[in-house]
Image: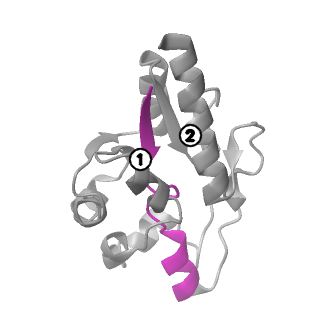
Amino acid sequence: MKVAFDLDGVLRDLIAPLESKYGFTATQWDWRVEGKDIYELMKSHYEMLTTAPTTKYKEVVDRYYAVPEIWTVQPMDWIEHTVKWINFHFPKSIVKVFSSGEGKEDWLKSYPEYILIEDTPNFKNYERVILIDQPYNRNVKTPNRVETVDQFDTMLKSWEEAYNEKWG
């Protein structure tokens, strides 16, 4: 079994610095602050892309994956800053940048040996997705939702065991 990790909302926490600066909580996927979405906000705050903290799940990734595979959708103007962030926090990693979430979901469909750790509420199928709980994805019904580091660790282990049992 191969594991891929989404970046924003799973490994990189962009919400925390925005909450700190603007005092809001991201409770929906398409949120706005002062009438701007996250892409418009970042045009004035690119430093947040390089200085954002990691999420609490990084410790599990570091424990099990010496070279994590990161799948992300990034606007072109974010890539330089995102690469700096990844190089600092995950210097040994494999990174795939997709132009859309649909591209990421299509890639997952094409490679059945993968599972994806993700936070988007926009996929059609969550069968091979461990969903990182976020306020904006609570409408997604899946038994594969994790809210804590311990749940994440346990679910990764159980999926690995099930995969090995089935595929050896």
Residue that carries the numbered disc 2 in the rendered image = 156
The scheme the figure's colours follow is one colour
Question: x, y percentage for residue 67?
Answer: 28, 45
Q: Report which quarter residue 107 is drawn in.
A: top left
Task: Decide which of 147, 151 is in the foreground and name it.
Answer: 151
Secondary structure beneath label 1 = helix
Question: x, y percentage for residue 141?
Answer: 78, 38
Residue at the (39%, 71%) spot, across then down: 42
Residue that carries the numbered disc 1 in the rendered image = 64
Question: Quadrant location of the N terminus?
Answer: top left
Query: Which residue in the rendered view is the most extreme toward the top?
Result: 167
Answer above or below: position of 29 versus 50: above
Answer above or below: position of 110 versus 146: above
Q: Is residue 35 in the magenta section?
A: no
Q: Which residues are magenta?
A: 1-21
Residue at the (43%, 17%) spot, across then down: 110
Residue at the (40%, 74%) spot, across then down: 52
